Amino acid sequence: MTKSRGIGSSLNWKPNLRKNISIIDFISLLFAVALILTLRFPQTWQGELSAYEIRNIFLALLVLVSWLFFLWFNGSRDTNILGFGADEYKRLINATLFSFTSIAFISYIFKLEISRAFILLVFPFGLITLFVSRRILRKRLLKARSEGRYLSKVLLLHSGENDPVESRLSIASHAGFDVVCKVQTLEGSKLDFKQIVTKAIDNNCDQIMVGQSAIISAAELRKLGWALEETSIDLIVAPAVTEIAGPRLKVSNVEGLPLLHLEQPVFSGVSRVTKRLLDLVLSVIGLIVISPFLLIVALMIKFYDRGSIFYSQKRIGQNNKEFSVYKFRTMYEGSHEQRGKVMAETNKDPRLAKDPQDPRVTKPGLFLRRWSIDEIPQIINVLKGEMSLVGPRPPLAEEVNQYEKSEKRRLLVKPGLTGLWQVSGRSELDWEDAVRLDLYYVENWSLTLDILIIIRTATAVWRGEGAY
């Protein structure tokens, strides 16, 4: 698993990365603040500066400094969250809200006259600028990590050759962990902490990770932490809990005993109302914007074989309720009755609905499936409240009949037009991975996760990844 090292592979890559991100954040926000200032007060850069214009520049600088401070204070450049997950973007949002609140508080206390239009424009635009720049940086970071750079070298403590942590880290190369050496912990034997630390230093490790299979007592773990005090090596413990997102994990301390609390998944309340509003707003806007294109698609389907434009099919939704899902027709009329035969001939898992070599698909259908255009009419299902923009895919009744007990948890939420399965490989995934991703979404749903999936879906569709 050890990879070749290049620029950024030394122990100094973390401060260097944080410094580079700080510079990019500064440039992004300076651009946003200067642009909005120019649009709102175009006379600022014309001739000599008046007292009014100097005040506007001062307020703009106050916004800039406040924003940069809260980006630092909120840990938005923490190398442990860069390159994967939603935490980085959540911290950008939190820093923006804190900055907005602080500016409002300062203006109230000191009775400063701040242009409401400037404030209402600069914060949304600045946040979008931050998102775009961080997204570009993330893509560059992932590319660098695939080349063996910007990786945290890890010494792994384990009790066997197949520790779950190592297998997960090997899949999640984007997370930036590279297991370069391992130490086996045996039941009944004492750990040589000095030897472990020496081995980590010799291999230039910046982290020691205690795997899920590691046999180590609380006292030994504490002593290992003490042994690392004179080094810059971090100690990480991988708990046995998996597939649980950060917002559901809470840590409390009772007389020195750390307790990990797992909050129950939330399937109702204010968050679900907000999700529904997001579905309605984005669906209506989307339909209005792309309606001319949909008319062209409808005419293409009709003129090809004079068949029906739309295809409806019974699917199973939230709480096992049956509903009709709408699609642009991509197959010849009456093809659904041949589904079982085609799946058997191609040795395709019947629980995964699509096959790349399906002979029932028309020529226009190949194009529509390639770019996921056939799924767009499901916006009607979203408007009717039968589906959501994001969620597990809506299964057939025959698929649900084959579900195991754990797989039925996919039906606790509304099925989605897109989901984690679509942005993580789509039809190229096997059944186990598709179920794992859907269950992760069900257990760890959040509005931020929904928004990120929608953005990633647009990218996946644009590239045509995994669709057929």
Image (cartoon, helix red, strand yellow):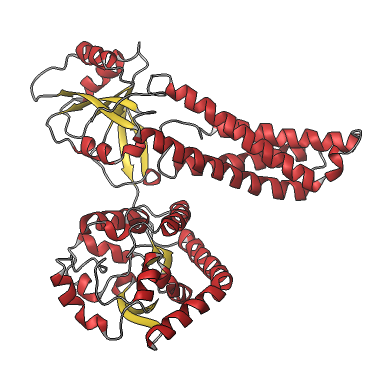
Q: Position of residue 365 (x, y in %)?
A: 36, 74
Residue 58 found in image quarter: top right
Residue 24 visible in this rendered orientation of the protein: yes
Residue appearing at x 89%, y 33% in the figure: 49
* Picture layout, residue 362 above or below residue 447: below
* Picture layout, residue 392 above or below residue 226: below
**274 or 379: nearer the eye?**
379
Quarter that holds the C terminus: bottom left
Q: Position of residue 400 (x, y in %)?
A: 22, 70
Quarter that holds the N terminus: top left
* Picture layout, residue 61 above or below residue 376: above
Q: Position of residue 314 (x, y in %)?
A: 30, 80
Residue 403 found in image quarter: bottom left
| Side of 197 relative to 464 (left or right) | left
Residue appearing at x 43%, y 85% in the figure: 303
Q: Position of residue 31 (x, y in %)?
A: 68, 39
**112 or 8: nearer the eye?**
8
Residue appearing at x 49%, y 64% in the figure: 273
Residue 110 visible in this rendered orientation of the protein: no
